[in-house]
Amino acid sequence: MMALWRRYDPTMNPQDLMIHFGLPLVFLGVMFGGEAFVIPAGWLAYQGYIPLPLVILASALGSFVANQAAFQVGYHQGATILQKRPGWQRQVDRLSGWVYRHGTGLAMGTRFLVGFRTLLAFSFGMARYSPRKFAVADYLGALLWAALMSVLGFAFGDGVETALNNMKGYEMLLLIAIAVICAALWLKRTARSHQFAK
């Protein structure tokens, strides 16, 4: 992290920032924001700032790390957390039923279930699912999900570029709008987590 910070120069333009810090930002963004960061990263790959295979890899790793953290918390501290957050119990019981019925296939598909992915990974841990099996299925699912979302952003790159060319002079407004949308998605996700806790 310090090595990255040493490469930072306040005079860098946005293109240089993406070239130097794009992959760590994609990794961290995907850990906390999911597809809200992967699709724009695919567009950055279309622009030539980051190679598409590296966007897919960074996105897959970010998503994998987030899911594995939720799984490990459920596996080791699940019962303690449910005592502090009894509102989660009903949801975890329902998701645990999915775990027992669908196992590996569901482990691969957790991130495709928007709104459930973190709690579902937590439920896999609570169900004492095999950590090794979950890790393998989860990483394969992360690669598939990251590839689909990144390619989606890449495929829409031409359309986005045309739209941006028509918006010359409004780039700052566009950046502000994107930041507001990302913040709203994050707040919605946080609010949903607090809802479970009630």
Image (cartoon, rainbow, N blue to C red):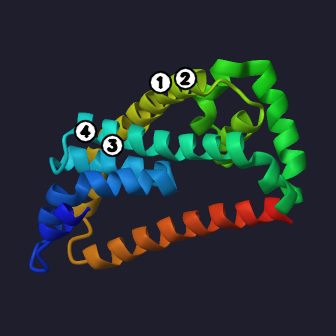
Using the image, tell me which numbered label, if any, was put on residue 58: 3
- The alpha-carbon separation of the residues under discs 1 and 2 comes to 5 Å
SS of the residue under disc 3: helix
x and y, in percent, of residue 8 in the image: 15, 71
Name the quarter where the N terminus is drawn. Answer: bottom left
In the image, 142 versus 122, the foreground residue is 122
Please name the residue that numbered disc 1 is placed on.
140
SS of the residue under disc 4: helix
- The alpha-carbon separation of the residues under discs 4 and 2 comes to 21 Å
Between disc 4 and disc 1, whose residue precedes? 4
Please name the residue that numbered disc 2 is placed on.
137
x and y, in percent, of residue 23 in the image: 26, 51
Q: Examine the rendering and report whether any part of residue 154 can be seen.
A: yes
Image marks 1 and 3: residues in contact by CB distance under 8 Å = no
Q: Quadrant of residue 138?
A: top right
Using the image, tell me which numbered label, if any, was put on residue 54: 4
Image marks 3 and 4: residues in contact by CB distance under 8 Å = yes
Which amino acid, mark 3?
Answer: Ala
